[in-house]
Image (cartoon, rainbow, N blue to C red):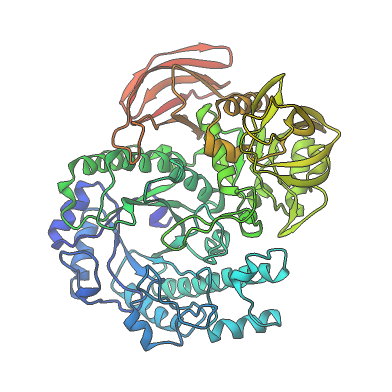
């Protein structure tokens, strides 16, 4: 077994430079078992001091051998950080034929505002491969690529133009223009071309590395919860040529306005694409883009609790420009979590499988082909807002939040992952405006519902074939919807009618015709918020439809996005009632706030019930997590149970047996808890 699969990875990257002996003390104190050795540029393996952002001692090649021996002595594997996306502008100008070229014909010169970037299709690849051989001969345990990527307006170098025309038979089209015309077949071609180029570069890189030493780990900085088209990173292609799937789910920007669930959602998402290989969430312990800052302990806590709960390893970067041990609160949290993972590896690596009966789809393909999709701010991409209604990321996170807050364990997958699930694995699959479903996926969903599964979907789900909008939903038979009408909105002050009550309308709706049971209608639009009392319209908002042994609930509007932005309590209650009626209950809790997330996994010997506590002050960055006390838990299981044990608090809990369940109390949940429920041998 490869070394990176033997135990959970506790990865630390430290920007500040130390003497070797002192660095080993820091890594040991942090309970690390893997390090990213950083501060090396894309094409200059041994950079000058002025290139490095951070102060302190810069490790030189003559010291590598001693450094590796010292690290291995304390049980730390060292992975060489290799920057393959940002190139010193002076070096780039020496090789203009390698530079990525923008649509205007000029070389890119604004990566992080001051850097350039080389193209994976250029002759630069050969320099990289020679560099890989040198790195491997030093004896490093792994190599990590930061990149490679394309950009939203690249690449139009001679190599790309020649390769594209050779494959597709026409000139390489403008990417940004096509992004506004996604129905055009050329849009699919350019996405495929760039993701194939990165996959080919990774395959060749891995072959070079493994030819020198087959035991060297190789992986890269992959795509997070975002479209693939701006950067060309397709995770399902990437993982076929690398050893770990990792993404920046823990990079938080400016006012931390992104969903608090980002690290956990990323962990779930990566696991659905990793084909059984390990996943890692990259967590920067800074408030991006301030590169010398440090996040408070509450935010670092949530990096750990979310990532490890949802099956991924934590990579944590400490970016301060001084000895990290001066930041005692943060260091103590890192030490505690890494020690906990080290002492309790089974919940994180011991062939556990999810017990969730609900699956939430992250519409990855839809993000590339739907004009309502947006591009989030990352280190690699600037924010691009969707031009039309139906923001997919907001819709996804709205449903994500609603599931967390009603304490329902759930998994996450992209559209393609639907093909790999057994029909009896889940009771409920949720499609948050998943507009682009492939025919094979539609066939799989139809079989799932016919056999008794249930689905919830919203807005334009299954309305497109890649970028082309259809006249009928692909899932129309299941949804009970005949025709797709026009989209209307934004509805700033309008309402819906349900059970005789008037409640908030989603921001956008879609006109439909249905033979299904109409549960809710839109109100007629009002000219102003004070103009008159709303009147019911003939436009359905919620449609229930039976198909085979299963059922569909369809929302003809952007309900997820409205939850994400407005947090309507009525929406949470509405969705909770559907979740509980369409999926078997596996756990019930009392006396717990909605800020407690729950996940459940099992192996042959144990169930593990994970509790992530988000309860905190009403601001971000979060400094303190507030304890929750006296939680009553009902866990539904037909297994014979031996004992119930708190791994975080290290205490045995008393429990009662009842028909089809056990009942126990948790005295306190501080930052985190895992309850281990032992199965008795039959």
The residue drawn where x is 43% and y is 38% is 309
**Residue 666 seen:** yes
The residue drawn where x is 20% and y is 73% is 60
**Residue 311 seen:** no
Q: Nearer the viewer, residue 458 or 246?
A: 458
Quarter containing the N terminus: bottom left
Q: Against 500, is 350 above or below?
A: below
The residue drawn where x is 50% and y is 25% is 681
On the image, the x and y values in percent for residue 203 come to: 51, 71
The residue drawn where x is 62% and y is 59% is 368
Q: Nearer the viewer, residue 499 or 646?
A: 499
Q: Nearer the viewer, residue 378 or 490?
A: 490
Q: Against 162, is 564 above or below?
A: above
Answer left or right for 338 relative to 500: left
On the image, the x and y values in percent for residue 193 come to: 61, 73
On the image, the x and y values in percent for residue 53 come to: 24, 66
Q: Nearer the viewer, residue 399 or 675?
A: 399
Answer left or right for 679 relative to 653: right
Residue 561: quarter of image: top right
Outermost residue toward the front in this view = 531
Residue 365: quarter of image: bottom right
On the image, the x and y values in percent for residue 81 come to: 33, 66
């Amino acid at each position: 077994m490869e070394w990176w699969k033997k135990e959970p990875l506790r990865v630390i990257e430290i920007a500040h430079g130390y003497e070797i002996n002192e660095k080993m003390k820091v890594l040991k104190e942090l309970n690390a078992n893997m390090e990213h050795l950083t501060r090396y540029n894309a094409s200059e393996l041994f950079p000058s001091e002025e290139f490095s952002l951070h102060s302190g001692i810069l490790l030189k090649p003559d010291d590598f051998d001693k450094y590796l021996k010292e690290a291995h002595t304390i049980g730390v594997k060292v992975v060489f950080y290799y920057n393959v996306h940002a190139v010193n502008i002076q070096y780039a100008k020496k090789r203009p034929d390698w530079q990525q070229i923008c649509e205007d014909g000029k070389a890119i010169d604004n990566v992080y505002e001051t850097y350039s970037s080389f193209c994976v299709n250029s002759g630069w690849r050969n320099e990289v491969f020679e560099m890989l051989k040198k790195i491997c001969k030093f004896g490093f345990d792994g190599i990590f690529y930061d990149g490679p990527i394309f950009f939203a307006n690249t690449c139009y170098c001679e190599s790309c133009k020649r390769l594209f025309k050779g494959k597709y038979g026409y000139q390489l089209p403008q990417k940004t223009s096509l992004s506004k015309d996604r129905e055009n077949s050329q849009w699919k071609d350019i996405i495929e071309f760039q993701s194939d180029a990165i996959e080919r570069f990774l395959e060749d890189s891995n072959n070079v590395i493994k030819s020198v030493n087959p035991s060297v780990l190789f992986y890269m900085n992959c795509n997070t919860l975002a479209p693939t088209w701006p950067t060309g990173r397709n995770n399902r292609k990437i993982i076929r040529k690398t050893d770990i799937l990792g993404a920046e789910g823990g990079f938080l920007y400016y006012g931390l306005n992104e969903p608090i669930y980002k690290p956990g959602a990323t962990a779930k998402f990566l696991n659905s694409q990793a084909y059984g290989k390990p996943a890692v969430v990259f967590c920067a312990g800074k408030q991006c883009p301030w590169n010398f800052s440090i996040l408070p302990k509450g935010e670092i806590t949530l990096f750990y609790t979310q990532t490890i709960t949802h099956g991924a390893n934590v990579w944590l970067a400490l970016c301060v420009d001084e000895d990290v041990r001066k930041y005692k609160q943060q260091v103590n949290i890192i030490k505690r979590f890494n020690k906990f993972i080290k002492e309790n590896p089974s919940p994180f690596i011991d062939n556990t499988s999810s017990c969730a009966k609900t699956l939430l789809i992250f519409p990855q393909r839809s993000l590339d082909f739907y004009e309502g999709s947006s591009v989030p701010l990352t280190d690699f991409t600037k924010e691009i807002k969707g031009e039309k209604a139906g923001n997919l990321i907001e819709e996804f996170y709205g449903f994500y939040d609603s599931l967390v807050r009603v304490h329902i364990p759930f998994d996450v997958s992209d559209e393609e992952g639907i093909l790999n699930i057994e029909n009896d694995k889940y009771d409920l699959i949720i499609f948050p405006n998943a507009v682009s479903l492939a025919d094979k996926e539609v066939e799989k969903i139809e079989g799932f519902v016919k056999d008794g599964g249930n689905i919830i979907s919203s807005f334009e789900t299954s309305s497109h074939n890649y970028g082309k909008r259809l006249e009928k939903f692909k899932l129309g038979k299941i949804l009970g919807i005949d025709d797709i009408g026009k989209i209307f909105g934004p509805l700033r002050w309008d309402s819906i009618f349900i059970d005789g009550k008037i409640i908030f309308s989603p921001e956008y709706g879609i006109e439909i015709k249905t033979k299904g049971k109409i549960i809710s209608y839109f109100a007629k639009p009002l000219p102003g918020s004070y103009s008159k009392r709303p009147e019911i319209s003939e436009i359905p908002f919620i449609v229930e439809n039976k198909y085979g042994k299963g059922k569909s609930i369809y929302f003809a509007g952007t309900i997820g996005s409205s939850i994400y932005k407005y947090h309507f309590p009525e929406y949470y209650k509405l969705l909770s009632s559907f979740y509980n009626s369409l999926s078997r209950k596996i756990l019930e809790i009392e006396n717990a706030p909605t800020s407690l997330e729950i996940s459940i996994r099992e192996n042959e010997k144990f169930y593990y019930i994970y509790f992530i506590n988000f309860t905190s002050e009403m601001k971000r960055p979060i400094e303190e997590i507030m304890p929750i006390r006296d939680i009553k838990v009902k866990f539904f299981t037909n297994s014979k149970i031996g004992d119930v044990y708190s791994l975080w608090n290290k205490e045995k809990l008393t429990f009662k047996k009842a028909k089809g369940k056990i009942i126990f109390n948790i005295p306190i949940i501080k930052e985190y808890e895992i309850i281990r429920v032992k199965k008795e041998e039959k």
